[in-house]
Image (cartoon, helix red, strand yellow):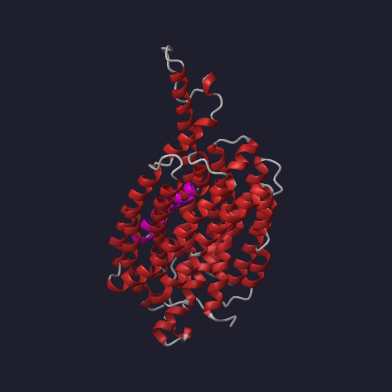
């Protein structure tokens, strides 16, 4: 049983669930941390950057190691490291201590995606890979949902520090389970498809430089760009969704986290599973079918995002339904794109490919999304405060600039709801750009798949 693909996929799903649980704890606790330390939205977003930057930088060498050394060992060490450092976040005495702890969490979690995605690619044949990756990636909404649900309640009942302690404990068990995972030969799934399950008969592949080959593949470059755009939105939502529900719709911390659980958890899970099935079905009809599904999801998500942000104060149900539907459609991205990377890249380069992809995804998207949205929110908050000051003094001729802090606007807290609401309108535009980039990737995919096939059959 321990060597069965189903057992391995179950453990990998659990690891990925914890992966996203631990990284999302901070988003669930943004408001109490912000209030305790007097942070603005840019400062809150910067705490996420500490994680994303080290996650991306460490992922490149770890991804290369995942192409050479046992992936289960790399995965186990990563789980152990990020779990210990997640718990350590609860001991942070100030902003910079928490910042440094989150750096370490990023290094540990960087081991998850390259090693786990490479394992899934070798455990399942191409025609079943989309659904297998959907199950693995279901850890994303499951982890985020559990993080919102548990962290919000623990923080409301005890403190935000206790929520970090609870998040760190399960990793010790999962690190041990990761060590007993099977370690299939790289390319074993392709061998099974072509040679009736004899990995020894895999056609040798010439590796003239994994990074150079990947960067010379147009579809891979389009996919890298799509990852940056997609993560911009996902991480902006991850940091500020609970804050939006608290500020704009007036929910308590626990209720806001419950709402985020439904939006990101249920919506994300539906999108992943439905997207995985749709992507595999579309592949039977078109070589570009998986990317068609991801593109269509991004297109349909744009008006729903606009509808959610148009919901007036207090209309939580309308906001949640529209945003949950847009999240479901956007999550089809993972099923289509991750499986496409596995199809596009030779087995011995998959760890490197995922690491490069995640490097751009997190440095350009995961970092920029919270920072840009937070900075824009702060700017629009100050502008709203300045406008309120002018209205309060109608006889004043010289209106204060938007970035000034007049006496009436020294306390910006009453204006943070409007500032964040306006800032979140950047998300539909980014989603539209994502759809365009995914469509461009679908145009170059057939030729790049043919080139990959030529490399795989070339004599060594």
Quarter of the picture holding the C terminus: bottom left
> Residue 258: horizontal and vertical position, in percent?
54, 52
How many labels sit on residues?
0
Quarter of the picture holding the N terminus: bottom right
Question: 394 and 103: which one is in front?
Answer: 394
Q: Is residue 235 magenta?
A: yes
Specify the quadrant of the image occupied by residue 55.
bottom right
Q: Is residue 190 left or right of residue 288?
A: right
Identity of the residue drawn at 64% across and 47% down: 156
Identity of the residue drawn at 41% across and 62% down: 271
Kindly tell me whether residue 274 is visible in this rendering. yes
Question: 61 and 9: which one is in front?
Answer: 9
> Residue 255: horizontal and vertical position, in percent?
55, 48
Q: Is residue 83 above or below residue 347?
A: above
Kindly tell me whether residue 69 is visible in this rendering. no
Specify the quadrant of the image occupied by residue 253.
top right
Q: Is residue 81 magenta?
A: no
Which segment did they paint magenta?
217-237
> Residue 106: horizontal and vertical position, in percent?
59, 54
Identity of the residue drawn at 62% across and 42% down: 32
Q: Is residue 134 above or below residue 48?
A: below
């Amino acid at each position: 049983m321990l060597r069965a693909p189903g057992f391995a996929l179950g453990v990998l799903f659990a690891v990925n669930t914890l992966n996203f649980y631990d990284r999302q704890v901070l988003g669930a606790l943004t408001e109490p941390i912000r209030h305790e330390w007097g942070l603005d939205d840019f400062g809150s977003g910067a705490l996420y950057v500490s994680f994303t930057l080290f996650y991306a930088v460490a992922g490149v060498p770890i991804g290369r190691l995942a192409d050479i050394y046992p992936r289960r060992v790399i995965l186990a060490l990563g789980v152990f490291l990020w779990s210990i450092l997640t718990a350590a976040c609860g001991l942070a005495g100030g902003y910079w201590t928490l910042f440094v702890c989150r750096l370490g969490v990023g290094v540990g979690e960087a081991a998850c995606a390259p090693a786990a995605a490479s394992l899934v690619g070798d455990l399942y044949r191409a025609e079943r890979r989309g659904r297998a990756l959907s199950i693995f990636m279901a850890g994303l909404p499951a982890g985020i949902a559990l993080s919102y649900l548990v962290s919000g309640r623990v923080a409301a009942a005890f403190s935000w520090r206790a929520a970090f302690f609870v998040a760190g404990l399960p990793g010790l068990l999962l690190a041990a389970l990761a060590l007993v995972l099977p370690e299939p030969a790289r390319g074993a799934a392709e061998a099974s498809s072509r040679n009736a399950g004899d990995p020894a008969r895999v056609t040798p592949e010439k590796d003239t430089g994994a990074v150079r080959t990947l960067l010379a593949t147009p579809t891979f470059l389009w996919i890298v760009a799509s990852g940056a755009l997609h993560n911009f939105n996902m991480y902006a939502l991850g940091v500020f969704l609970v804050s939006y529900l608290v500020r704009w719709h007036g929910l308590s911390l626990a209720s806001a986290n419950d709402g985020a659980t439904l939006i990101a958890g249920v919506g994300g899970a539906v999108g992943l599973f439905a997207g995985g099935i749709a992507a595999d079905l579309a592949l039977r009809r078109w070589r570009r079918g998986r990317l068609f599904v991801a593109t269509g999801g991004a297109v349909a998500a744009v008006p729903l995002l606009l509808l959610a942000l148009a919901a007036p104060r207090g209309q939580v149900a309308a906001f949640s339904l529209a945003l949950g539907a847009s999240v479901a459609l956007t999550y089809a991205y993972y099923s289509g794109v991750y499986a496409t990377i596995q199809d596009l890249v030779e087995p011995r380069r998959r760890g490197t490919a995922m690491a490069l992809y995640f490097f751009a995804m997190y440095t350009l998207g995961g970092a920029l999304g919270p920072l840009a949205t937070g900075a824009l929110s702060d700017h629009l908050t100050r502008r709203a405060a300045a406008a309120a000051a002018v209205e309060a003094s109608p006889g004043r001729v010289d209106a204060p600039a938007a970035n000034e802090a007049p006496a009436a606007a020294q306390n910006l807290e009453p204006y943070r709801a409007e500032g964040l609401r306006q800032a979140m309108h950047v998300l539909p535009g980014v989603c539209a750009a994502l759809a365009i980039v995914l469509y461009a990737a679908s145009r170059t995919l057939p030729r790049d798949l043919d080139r990959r096939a030529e490399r795989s059959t070339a004599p060594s």
